[in-house]
Amino acid sequence: MKILVVEDEAGLRDLLAQGLRDEGHEVLAIGDAEGAMALCGTEAFDVYLLDILLPNMSGTSLCRWLRDQGIKGQIWMVTALSGSSDKVLGLDFGADDYLTKPFDLAEINAKLRAQERKTLGYPRPECRVGDLVLNPNTQTVSRGGVVIDLSKKEYSLLEYLVRNRDTLVTRAMIAKSVWTSQTNLYTNVIDVYLTYLRKKIDGDRPDRLIHTLRGKGVMVSDREPDKL
């Protein structure tokens, strides 16, 4: 998921952002409401984590501004204020949830997983290509009945390729959908992750599933590209 963290305390902001990145999320972190407003003019996020006690403009006011702009993503208030009146104010301004400091990062990640399941629909059917089986509910992968251990980003890339099976996808398409970037900044990174996947998914097997068409793109298929 793509997440915006707005927290003025640098140490806490970095800790929260890194903890979310470790779970495979794309995170942008900023220290004030004004910067967040400028950023939200050009980028959309799935979840907005807003501290209430921000300099110059409160997180609740930022929350109301986001809703006034038509933002539909989840807005969660993260604050040391625990009074019920503060929670009511945040919810009335358009917040979806309220997290009180000191927060439990594991709890936040669990809430994010629950939100992702709700957004994508749950349970979702397994995806199969040949003897490759991908379970989007448990984010597990197996081939020929053997479980394959993937990192979160490897899994995200493979799921994107599998959901576009028999279809050639370019690196620009992968960057936009998996790395949520419209630039070619991640081209080399994508190549590295494709190499990881080929080793883990195909290895020495004669029946390859990941096919690269030089200068064109990549596809997952249980047939050779020239036979599609």
Image (cartoon, grey):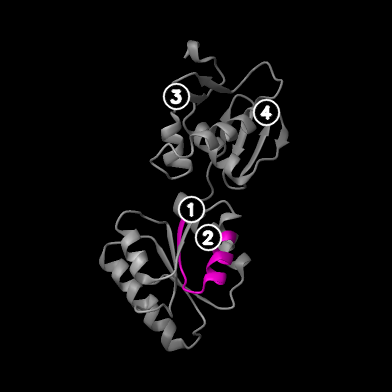
Look at 42% across and 88% down and name the residue there. 85
Residue 168 numbered tag = 3
Q: Which label's residue is closer to the chain start, 4 or 3?
A: 3
Q: Is residue 183 above or below residue 70?
A: above
Magenta residues, start to end: 1-18
- State the residue lying farthest toward the right: 146
Query: How far apart are labels 4 and 3 at the CA level?
Result: 20 Å
Distance from the alpha carbon under mark 1 to that under mark 4: 26 Å
**Label located before the other in sequence (2 or 4):** 2
Mark 2 vs mark 1, foreground winner is 1
Determine the residue located farthest toward the top in the rendered image.
Answer: 227
Q: Which residue is mark 2?
A: 112
**Horizontal and vertical percent for residue 28?**
46, 58
Among the two numbered marks 2 and 3 on one chain, the one whose residue lies closer to the N terminus = 2
Disc 1 target residue: 1
Label 4 crowd bin: few (<14), some (14–19), many (20+), radius 10 Å? few
Which is nearer the eye, 65 or 55?
55
Q: Secondary structure at mark 1?
A: loop
Task: Look at 49% across and 11% down and name the residue there.
Answer: 226
Q: Are marks 1 and 4 in contact (CB under 8 Å)?
A: no
- Cβ–Cβ below 8 Å for labels 2 and 1? yes
Q: Residues within 10 Å of mark 2 (few under 14, many from 20)?
A: many
Query: Amino acid type of disc 4?
Result: Lys
